[in-house]
Amino acid sequence: MINRRKFIRHSVLSTGAILLAQNLNARIPSTNSFPLVISTWAPNVKANKVAWEVLANGGRALDAIEKGVMVTEADPDDTSVGYGGLPDRDGNVTLDACIMDELGGCGSVMCIENIMHPVSVARLVMEKTPHVVLVGRGAFEFALKNGFKKENLLTASSEKFWKEWLKTSMYNPMDTMKHMKQKRAPGSIDNHDTIGMLAMDVNGNLSGACSTSGMAFKMKGRVGDSPIIGAGLFVDNEVGAATATGVGEEVIRMCGSHTVVEAMRYGKSPKEACQLAVERMYKLRKNNLNDMQIGFIAVNKSGEIGAFSLREGFNYCYRSGEGLDVVNDAEFLLKK
């Protein structure tokens, strides 16, 4: 499994093409050049690379983010997205994803099973139906009718973790996450993350996508923020775009990504807008957040990017006009 901190320390620095930001207080300036792509979590430089290939060839941002997110969805070592995702309490891998383009078009699938690339199904919901959301069996049948094949997404590794969890069957999501951390190698990835990706193409148009297998061992039917337009993702081509990661229930409560975009509409920089959303969430829920993590990334229409999280440990990666991958640790609210 991917160890985010180890990934940054060894894999990122060894490439020579990736820059690791050292100053957590440094403000990320405008790239002043298009295109650009930004994703939650450092390991997703691999997804950014594929998205960049589309953008560098003059492709549309929507095509770029779909291709990029598909990379993570197909990675069996990422236990929080797609193939290899940790299952629900019944041992079923259920996936959620959404996508949004520069025209205000959006599509989403929730609790879809046995389909490798829910982000692509979400795009078809946007483009081929009069709806925004399809769920469960309906989403699965729609995918099959549009050429997707049924696949087993539960890897041997994820099944092993699930069977270990069954010994205690702890339901509380935060207790479950603590249990999983104890069973994994120190620093290994949490089980409640997503890939959220935003891109701006050579024409200055924005698109975004979000994909996840959701919280490990969740109650059957549970859906977090990732496939919910306005919570896990929001794009306004006149203003900017934002996406979220972390415990989805808290992001949903205050329409997190929409809040970030609206803050940018009224003059906040992307980083300031992300911080505003986190602070508002903390003010509302500070007695209920325990050890939860929530993070946002954002980009505005000028190509300026930013990020902010509730706690230390959230990082993001981006690639802009210079073609270099950059990994940054986000600033955070709660200091130790």
Image: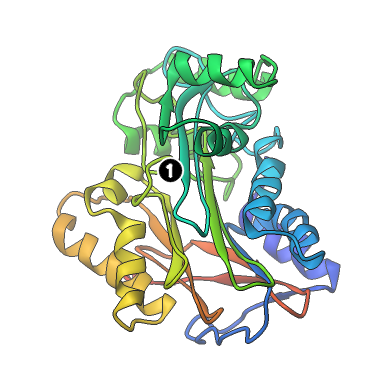
Q: Where on the picture, by quarter, is residue 89?
A: top left
The residue at which mark 1 appears reads as 226
Residue drawn at (33%, 76%), measured in percent from left and top?
Answer: 265
24 vs 244, nearest the viewer: 244
Q: Report x, y in % for residue 38.
A: 60, 64
> Considering depth in this image, is 124 or 137 the residue closer to the camera?
124
> Of the residues shown, which amino acid type is indicated by label 1?
Ser
Work out whether residue 84 or residue 158 is closer to the camera in this orientation and state it. 84
> Disc 1 on helix, strand or loop?
loop
Q: Quadrant of residue 203?
A: bottom right
- Mark 1, residues whose alpha carbon is within 10 Å: few (<14), some, or many (≥20)? many
Which of the pair 227/10 is nearer the observer?
Answer: 227
Q: Position of residue 293 (x, y in %)?
A: 37, 54
Q: Residue at x 36, y 18 (%)?
A: 220
When the figure is inspected, residue 230 is found, relative to residue 241, above or below; the finding is above
Q: Locate the C terminus and report the quarter of the image it occupies.
A: bottom left
Kindly identify the residue that appears in the image at 28 percent across and 53 percent down.
Answer: 255
Does residue 80 show up?
A: no
